[in-house]
Structure formats: C-alpha cells, structure tokens
Amino acid sequence: MSIGRRKRPFQSKHAVEPFPFWTSRSQTSIGTSFRTKRFAGSPLIISSSIRSGGRDLHHRYDFSGRATGEPPYTVEQIIDLYDMLHKLGGTNGVIRQCEFFLYSEKDKEAVRKCQERNYRYPEITGWIRAVKEDFKLVKEMGLKETGILTSVSDYHIFLKLKKNRRAVMREYLSIVSAALDLGIIPRCHFEDVTRADIYGFCVPFAQDIMRLSEDSKLPVRFGSAIPWVMECPIPAPRFPVACPKSSGR
C-alpha cells in the first residue's frame, strides 16, 4: 500500500497590504462588458465597451460567440459612447474607468478627443499587449494606468506563445516591473483563467506581482477574464471573484 504525503493548505509567505482586485467579467443584456471592483460600498465599474467596439471585423462577437460582422467604432461613435458612460456613471463615478486601444491613429485620436472632455470619470486607461515597447504608447497618451494582456491558460502558454510556464511568468513579471518603473499602474488581466493551473501558476504569479508592487510602492490591479457567454450551461466559477482569499490575503 502506498502512502501519499498529505498536502498542506496554501499559505502566502508574505503579508501584503490590500489592493483593489477586479472581479470576473460579466455581460449585460445590451451587450456592454463591465468589470466591478469589490469594495465595502457600492461596486465600481470598468467598462470595456469602447475597447471591444474598436476591434476589427474578425474579433467582434455576439453573446452566442458568433462573429457579428459589424465594423469597428468610428471616432465619433467612441466619443458618443464615452459621453454616455460619463452620464450613466454620475458624479460619484460608479463607472470608474474605460479601456482604450492605443495602436492605430484612430485609437489615438479617440483618446485625445475623450481627454478633451476633461471628465473625472470614467478615467481613460489603456489596453496593451505584454510587450515593453507598448508602454511607449501609454506614456505618449499621458495615461496613468493600463490593462496588460497576461494570458495564463496552458492553451495560450504552450500552443499560442510556444513557451513554458516558467518562461512566460518571467516575461510577464519583467513587463509589470517595467510598467512600475515608469510610474504606470499595471492592471494584469488573467485571460482564460478558467483553463489555467490556479495554484501552480496563477496564485504564485499574483504573489510575485504583489511583491513588485510592495517594492515600488505603487498599487497593482488584477482582472480575471472568463471565456463564457450568457448561454453557457455551467455557472461561472467562484475562484476569480475570491482571488484575494485564494492568494492568502
């Protein structure tokens, strides 16, 4: 009879001061994607509507996962949507932030036009790849915070990126460190987290990010993107919403 070693419960080695965490992505009936912050008071929302509408024809999907074939938003449409989100969020900024692409000239023009509105809320934030060169775009547009695409599933790591977990984690951490060195608040989006190794990759990765945050004295934020739509027959997993507890906080 073989005797297996009993696993000890996961505990964080470092005491970390709490920082805001994003919860999982949800979609409303009007097709607008939001994320909410978990605070003691009312939830605060970050909208990815503008970023989603800025995608090209091959990356626009409806709730059933089918390509819509709709053209990307024009600059005027983005401004109108930004004005609408400002009104919906009210003076207290319930809709706290918006995500913008920064790559094309149209993206940059839309950001500049929205910045001219001088709205306090929603704050304009970027959305970039995990590439150091992309931070130049964030600095160029004068943004204080940006979302970073940090895909965590083995599907992305091994099949799309053609690397292993250790190499990808080292690369992601170097990107986060570069952002903090520039004084930019990184919002790390754990894409495809439901197919990832939670305790073997995601939690250690999050802990290393928090250590970088402690060293730089700047906050970091997390996003957990769940690839499910309204018709999904299984409930959304609980882990991404309870990320602080699972990471020993």
Image (tube, rainbow, N blue to C red):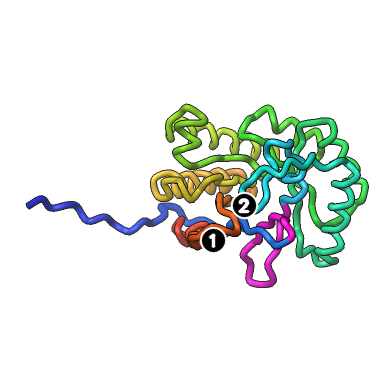
Residue 219 or 1: which is nearer the viewer? 1
Residue labelled with disc 1: 241
Magenta span contains residue 36: yes
- Give the number of the disc on residue 45: none
Task: Classify 10 Å Cα crowding around label 2: few (below 14), some (14-19), many (20 and above).
Answer: few
Q: Residue 58: image x %, image y %?
A: 68, 36
Residue 15 or 118: which is nearer the viewer? 118
The answer to whether residue 63 is left or right of residue 4 is: right
Q: Secondary structure at mark 2?
A: loop
In whole angstroms, how far apart are the C-alphas of marks 1 and 2? 23 Å
Camera-side mark, 1 or 2: 2
The answer to whether residue 238 is left or right of residue 180 is: left
Q: Residue 216: image x %, image y %?
A: 61, 44
Residue 90 or 218: which is nearer the viewer? 90
Name the residue rendered at 58%, 50% in the picture.
225
Amino acid type, mark 1: Val
Residue labelled with disc 2: 64
Magenta span contains residue 68: no
Q: Residues in magenta?
A: 30-47
The answer to whether residue 118 is left or right of residue 216 is: right
The answer to whether residue 164 is left or right of residue 217 is: left
Asked whether disc 1 touches disc 2, contact meaning CB atoms under 8 Å apart, the reply is: no
Q: Residue 115: image x %, image y %?
A: 88, 46
Residue 36 or 159: which is nearer the viewer? 159
Name the residue rendered at 54%, 48% in the picture.
210
Q: Residue 39: image x %, image y %?
A: 63, 67
